[in-house]
């Protein structure tokens, strides 16, 4: 008997083979040592539930290929390849930035191909596309040629329609409220606390991605705001309630891309005189707790702007700008804007990157100054706008409205990798290139601080590094991913008799609230 003469049995056997292969390869998403560390002992019943949670996802992927081809043997190869590709991507991502694949990474797929250099994905070149094309369409073509389909001879249109409905209907149903709510709550019960590494171990890469997406899809704005309202410990109070004759305050936040003082790690010969000077005249300075080890600037950025810990935003923590509007009532820029401040976001990069063009207005920024407003030519100026050029632009922006209470958030790009030949004179060593970029960042910081200190108004400057660099030539992983920060009073706010203060570790979600307290613009609410 030909094996395709028993289509139901063949399909069941093929699906069983797929399940075995997926279960056998899912653990490869993480290095073995990391896998063991995150493999939490659970009661047998919970372990069985975790294993069973993968089956519907595997079945839907298998059904998707089956509904399109009606070739079960092909579906074995296609489904296993699908899961293994996700597992391989997760492993590659972990090797690079110490985090497995998360559902929000899917939203970055277009950006990865659009900005290959910034994602260190230059290998996604023409050879990658040729290989991918040959594999997908070449192998599929061979199956279509050699494997007969098992589509019934009668009522074929109805069978095709039924197959498509079974395979793709559940995915679309997730976006329907009456279905989404119960499914999301059940998924939350199965998954429990959001822990990317532990959940990747428990469910495998693609199933973990799907489960987290279902939870994210079911999160409602009113629930998020209600939960967070009980967590907020401070609020703006009497925001510059002086009379009209007083000079309006200015707050400048400078988020320095990939900035970390390498002297913490014994690097000799590096001088950062302006940072050292500002530390001595600061209200507070020290090391900043890392939100993420070596990338995803938006996570640190959002933590500073919102005052919220990653645990507070739960499933949104991996990519908070996907639903920035959920947090509009809570974040600092909107509080300042509602209190009569001008709010500006300055970032010399594509405005659509990380969806900032949509997120920042929702978070409360009146004006955005992005790459299209800079005179920057990569062939002339290098891949990114320099910190010095950025400083000059920021100064011009501040000078436009000297009579307004002004909040300016600056996110630089100049220190970003890759640190390749051509970035700095004749240097080819990545560490030497990065070190020189630190010096240039320090020089620009000195220029900015000098200008701010000459203003006849209260000025507060917060400077910090968003995360440690992905500088694998220096360390992999970084021995201590904490970056550096400094909160400095300048202009009328500067106390000339102020003595140096000792270093103090601070979390990014506390930085802006801490600055506002030093400036006398907020107070603790009674608990």
Image (spheres, rainbow, N blue to C red):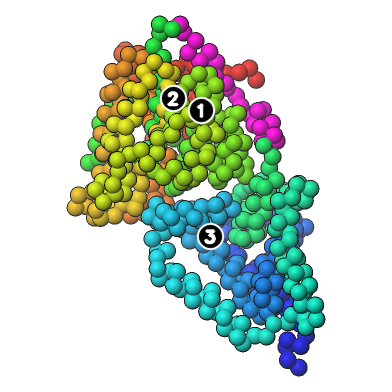
Rendered image quadrant of residue 6: bottom right
**Mark pair 2, 1: CA separation:** 8 Å
Rendered image quadrant of residue 21: bottom right
Q: Which residue is mark 1?
A: 333
Where is residue 202 shown, x and y percent of the image? 65, 58
Please give the range of residues in magenta: 222-243
Q: Which residue is mark 2?
A: 407
Q: Residues within 10 Å of mark 2 (few under 14, many from 20)?
A: many
Q: Residue at x 70, y 35 (%)?
A: 223
Residue 195 included in the magenta stretch of the image: no
Q: Are marks 2 and 1 in contact (CB under 8 Å)?
A: yes
Residue 241 included in the magenta stretch of the image: yes
Q: Residue at x 41, y 28 (%)?
A: 408
> Closer to the camera: disc 1 or disc 3?
1
Give whichever of discs 3 and 2 has the lower sequence position: 3
> Closer to the camera: disc 3 or disc 2?
2
Q: Which residue is mark 3?
A: 90
């Amino acid at each position: 008997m030909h094996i395709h003469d028993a289509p139901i049995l063949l399909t069941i056997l093929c699906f069983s083979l797929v399940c075995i292969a997926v279960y056998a390869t899912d653990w490869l998403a993480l290095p073995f040592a990391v896998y063991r560390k995150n493999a939490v002992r659970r009661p047998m019943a919970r372990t069985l539930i975790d294993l069973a949670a993968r089956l519907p996802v595997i079945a839907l992927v298998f059904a998707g290929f089956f509904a399109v081809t009606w070739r079960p043997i092909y579906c074995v190869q296609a489904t296993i390849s699908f899961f293994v590709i996700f597992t391989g991507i997760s492993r590659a991502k972990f090797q690079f930035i110490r985090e497995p694949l998360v559902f929000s990474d899917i939203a970055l797929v277009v950006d990865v191909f659009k900005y290959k250099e910034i994602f260190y994905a230059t290998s996604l070149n023409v050879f990658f596309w040729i290989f991918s094309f040959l594999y997908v369409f070449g192998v599929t073509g061979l199956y279509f040629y050699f494997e007969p389909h098992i589509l019934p001879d009668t009522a074929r249109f109805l069978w095709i329609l039924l197959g498509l409905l079974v395979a793709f209907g559940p995915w679309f149903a997730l976006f329907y409220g009456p279905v989404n709510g119960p499914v999301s709550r059940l998924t939350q019960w199965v998954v429990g606390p959001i822990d990317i590494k532990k959940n990747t171990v428990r469910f495998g890469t693609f199933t973990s991605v799907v489960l987290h997406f279902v939870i994210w899809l079911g999160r409602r704005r009113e629930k998020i705001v209600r939960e967070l309202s009980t967590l907020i410990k401070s609020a703006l109070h009497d925001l510059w309630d002086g009379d009209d004759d007083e000079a309006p305050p200015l707050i400048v936040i400078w988020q320095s891309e990939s900035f970390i003082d390498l002297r913490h790690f014994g690097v000799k010969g590096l001088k950062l005189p302006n940072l050292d000077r500002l530390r001595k005249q600061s209200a507070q300075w020290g090391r900043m707790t890392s939100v993420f080890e070596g990338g995803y600037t938006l996570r640190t950025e959002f933590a500073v702007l919102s005052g919220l810990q990653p645990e507070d935003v739960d499933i949104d923590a991996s990519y908070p700008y996907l639903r920035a509007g959920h947090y509009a009532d809570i974040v600092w820029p909107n509080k300042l804007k509602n209190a009569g401040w001008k709010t500006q976001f300055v970032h010399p990069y594509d405005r659509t990157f990380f969806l900032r063009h949509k997120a920042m207005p929702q978070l409360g920024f009146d004006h955005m100054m992005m790459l299209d407003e800079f005179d920057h030519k990569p062939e002339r100026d290098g891949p990114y706008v320099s910190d010095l050029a950025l400083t000059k632009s920021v100064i011009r922006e501040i000078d436009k409205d000297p009579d307004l209470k002004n909040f300016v958030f600056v996110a630089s790009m100049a220190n970003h990798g890759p640190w390749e030949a051509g970035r700095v004179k004749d240097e080819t060593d990545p560490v030497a290139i990065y070190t020189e970029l630190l010096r240039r960042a320090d020089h620009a910081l000195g220029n900015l601080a000098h200008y701010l200190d000459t203003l006849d108004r209260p000025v507060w400057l917060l400077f910090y590094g968003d995360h440690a660099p992905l500088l694998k030539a220096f360390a992999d992983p970084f021995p201590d991913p904490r970056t550096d920060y400094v909160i400095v009073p300048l202009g009328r706010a500067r106390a000339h008799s102020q003595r140096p203060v000792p270093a103090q570790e601070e979390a990014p979600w506390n930085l802006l609230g801490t600055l506002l307290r030093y400036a006398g613009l907020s107070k603790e609410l009674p608990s």
